[in-house]
Image (cartoon, rainbow, N blue to C red):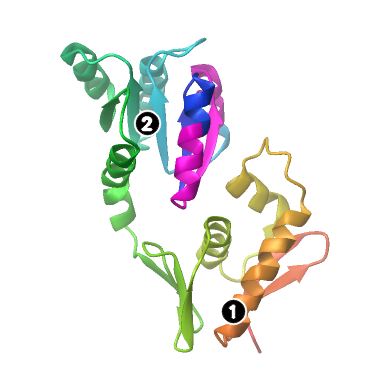
Amino acid sequence: MRILLAEDEKSLSRAIVALLEKNNYSADAVYNGRDALEYLSAENYDAVILDIMMPEMDGLTVLHKIRENGNRIPVLMLTAKSEVEDKVLGLDTGANDYLTKPFATAELLARLRAMTRTQIAQVSSQLTFGNITLDQTSFELSSKSGSFRLANKEFQMIELLLRNPRQLIPTERFLEKIWGYDSDVELNVVWVYISYLRKKLAALHANIQIRATRNTGYSLEEIK
């Protein structure tokens, strides 16, 4: 699951991103409301964490524009204010939930899970292709031969492949989707994680494989 975090306090932003990635989320961070809108228009996200007090454009204005455009993405608002009126205004503008700083990290994760629960429940928690199944709630890749609990990036890569079986996914798409389009990560990091996944599929005696198309990308195919 990919999260956009809009928080102008950079030390807090780094801490939240580290927390999210440790819990198998992918997170992109921006530091003002205008960038938040640009990222949302250019990329696909599963949820947004918005600070209210941000430069260039405040979080409530960002939220209003998101909803005005018909985007129903789950939004969690962060604020240093605790007045009831602020919470009511945020919720009435279209926020799904509200969290006042300072907050416990466990509460942030719990609210994020609750906020996205309906969205996740709309699709099966399992993706299956061939004799391989990926459980999206436990992050386990399995077959009748066994199972592996995947690390964050491995999970996101195989999830993308399993959601698009037999389709060629450009290498750049993996970078954009998982590391973010402004990341300075080299293309060869994708190959490294593909290698990890291939070894796990082999250990699970998979009847599917990750096929490489030279200088283009990867696809998930049945073994013939």
How far apart marks 2 and 1 lie (CA) works out to 40 Å
Q: Is residue 6 left or right of residue 77?
A: right
The quadrant in which the C terminus is found is: bottom right
**Up/down of 81 relative to 107, above or below:** above
Q: Is residue 222 left or right of residue 213?
A: left
- Look at the numbered disc 1 and give the secondary structure of its residue: helix
Residue 194 point in image, percent of width and height: 68, 66
Residue 7 point in image, percent of width and height: 47, 23
Q: Amino acid at mark 1?
A: Leu
Q: Which residues are magenta?
A: 15-41
196 or 58: nearer the eye?
Answer: 196
Q: Give the image quarter of residue 86.
A: top left
| Residue 147 within the segment the image draws in magenta | no
Residue at the limit of the structure toward the right, as seen here:
215
Residue at the limit of the structure toward the left, as seen here:
84
Which of the two discs, 2 and 1, labels the residue nearer the N terminus? 2
Q: Residue at x 28, y 42 (%)?
A: 115
Q: Give the image quarter of residue 201.
A: bottom right
Q: Nearer the viewer, mark 2 or mark 1?
A: 1
Q: Is residue 179 left or right of residue 128?
A: right
Label of residue 63 in the image: none
Q: Amino acid at mark 2?
A: Gly
Provide the residue designation for mark 1.
201
Q: Is residue 158 left or right of residue 146?
A: right
Provide the residue designation for mark 2.
70
